[in-house]
Image (spheres, helix red, strand yellow):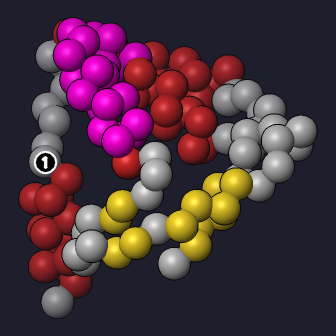
Amino acid sequence: MVLTIKPNNHLTPLIPIKLTILSKKKYYSPMTMTVDKIVAEALAHTPQVRAFMVERLIESLDTAPGEKLSSQWSVEIQKRCREIDEGTVELHDAEVVFSKAYASLE
């Protein structure tokens, strides 16, 4: 299988990456070791630093290249992160939430 990675700017060419399926959920690519190293290094940071990294990564998925989040969405993200840090909201495991939601549809 060949996956083409779209770069985050128009100046960088598309990058085809050949993936070999090792199992249902495991892929190997030349970047795997780099990704594993990045994840390992990220996990070594404090929870606050990891939360910041996650916020930035999610922002990068939610916007088109070069497009910034609206100020309202940035304020909402900061509010939610603050509520989590302060313990003023109750967090739920996504698997449990989705399981209950799917069960209610049956």
Q: What secondary structure is the magenta-colored segment mainly?
A: helix
Q: Residue at x 57, y 44 (%)?
A: 61
Examine the rendered structure and indicate whether residue 14 appears above or below residue 33. below
| Mark 1 lies on residue | 93
Q: Is residue 49 magenta?
A: yes
Outermost residue to the right: 11
Question: Residue 87: x percent and y percent?
Answer: 15, 16
Q: Amino acid at mark 1?
A: Asp
| Front one among 23 and 89 | 23
Q: Is residue 42 magenta?
A: yes
Q: Is residue 100 visible?
A: yes
Question: Residue 103: x percent and y percent?
Answer: 13, 79
User: On the rendered structure, is 94 left or right of 32?
Assistant: left
So how many labels did they put on this image? 1
User: On the rendered structure, is 25 left or right of 96?
Assistant: right
Q: Residue at x 23, y 75 (%)?
A: 23
Q: Is residue 79 visible?
A: no
Q: Residue at x 12, y 68 (%)?
A: 100
Name the quadrant containing residue 33: top left
Q: Residue at x 64, y 56 (%)?
A: 5
Examine the rendered structure and indicate whether residue 27 appears above or below residue 103. above
User: On the rendered structure, is 74 left or right of 95?
Assistant: right
Question: Residue 9: x percent and y percent?
Answer: 81, 38
Question: Residue 64: x percent and y percent?
Answer: 74, 44
What is the crowding at mark 1: few (fewer than 14 residues within 10 Å), some, or many (at least 20)? few
> SS for tag 1?
loop
| Front one among 19 and 43 | 19
Q: Which residues are magenta?
A: 33-52
Name the quadrant containing residue 97: bottom left
Q: Which image quarter is the C terminus in?
A: bottom left
